[in-house]
Image (tube, rainbow, N blue to C red):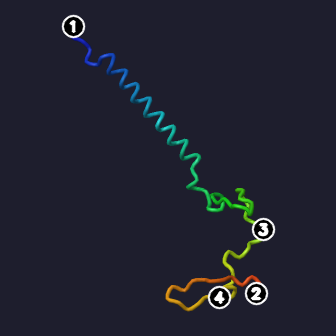
């Protein structure tokens, strides 16, 4: 009588390999289920309010992010730097 070609260790390794494969597949399905790639951009955005807190809703009053160019005085140099800011001038 000859011995079995498949030893106990070979069977155990095969079981572990199959178990790892099924676990990996389940993790993959979990990632797909909770993925953000299929959601619209509006659900992925987070807004920061004036206090630095995160919020899902956009701010109510949008302030201009850039001041009016008329409030700055520049001198004509080769590197054109802003020397002062005129606080008294109103934005147009």
Q: Which of marks 1 and 4 precedes in the sequence?
A: 1
Q: Which of marks 3 and 1 precedes in the sequence?
A: 1
Residue on which disc 3 sits: 60
Q: Position of residue 67 (x, y in %)?
A: 69, 80
Element under label 3? loop
Element under label 4? strand
Q: Which of marks 1 and 2 precedes in the sequence?
A: 1
Q: Position of residue 21 (x, y in %)?
A: 43, 34
Kindly check if marks 2 and 4 are in contact, taking CB atoms under 8 A apart as contact: no
Q: Alpha carbon of mark 3 to alpha carbon of mark 4: how far?
A: 32 Å
Residue on which disc 1 sits: 1
Residue at the image position 57 percent from the left and 50 percent from the top: 35
Q: Which of marks 2 and 3 precedes in the sequence?
A: 3
Residue on which disc 4 sits: 73
Q: How many other residues sit within 10 Å of disc 3, few (<14), some (14-19) or many (≥20)?
A: few
Q: Position of residue 59 (x, y in %)?
A: 75, 66
Residue on which disc 2 sits: 89
Q: Which of marks 4 and 3 precedes in the sequence?
A: 3
- Seen in the picture, residue 15 relative to 41 is either above or below; the reply is above
Q: In this orientation, which residue lies closer to the viewer: 44 or 6?
A: 44
Kindly check if marks 2 and 1 are in contact, taking CB atoms under 8 A apart as contact: no
Q: Alpha carbon of mark 3 to alpha carbon of mark 2: how far?
A: 26 Å
Residue 91: quadrant of the picture: bottom right
Q: How many other residues sit within 10 Å of disc 2, few (<14), some (14-19) or many (≥20)?
A: few
Element under label 1? loop
Q: Mark 4 or mark 1: which is in front? A: 4
Q: Mark 3 or mark 4: which is in front? A: 4
Q: Alpha carbon of mark 1 to alpha carbon of mark 3: how far?
A: 85 Å
């Amino acid at each position: 009588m000859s011995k079995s070609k498949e030893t106990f260790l070979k069977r155990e390794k095969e079981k572990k390999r199959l178990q790892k494969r099924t676990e990996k597949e389940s993790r993959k399905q979990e990632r797909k289920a909770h993925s953000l790639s299929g959601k619209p951009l509006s659900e992925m955005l987070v807004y920061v309010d004036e206090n630095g807190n995160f919020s899902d809703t956009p701010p109510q009053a949008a302030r201009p992010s850039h001041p009016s160019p008329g409030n700055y005085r520049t001198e004509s140099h080769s590197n054109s730097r802003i020397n002062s800011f005129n606080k008294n001038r109103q934005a147009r």
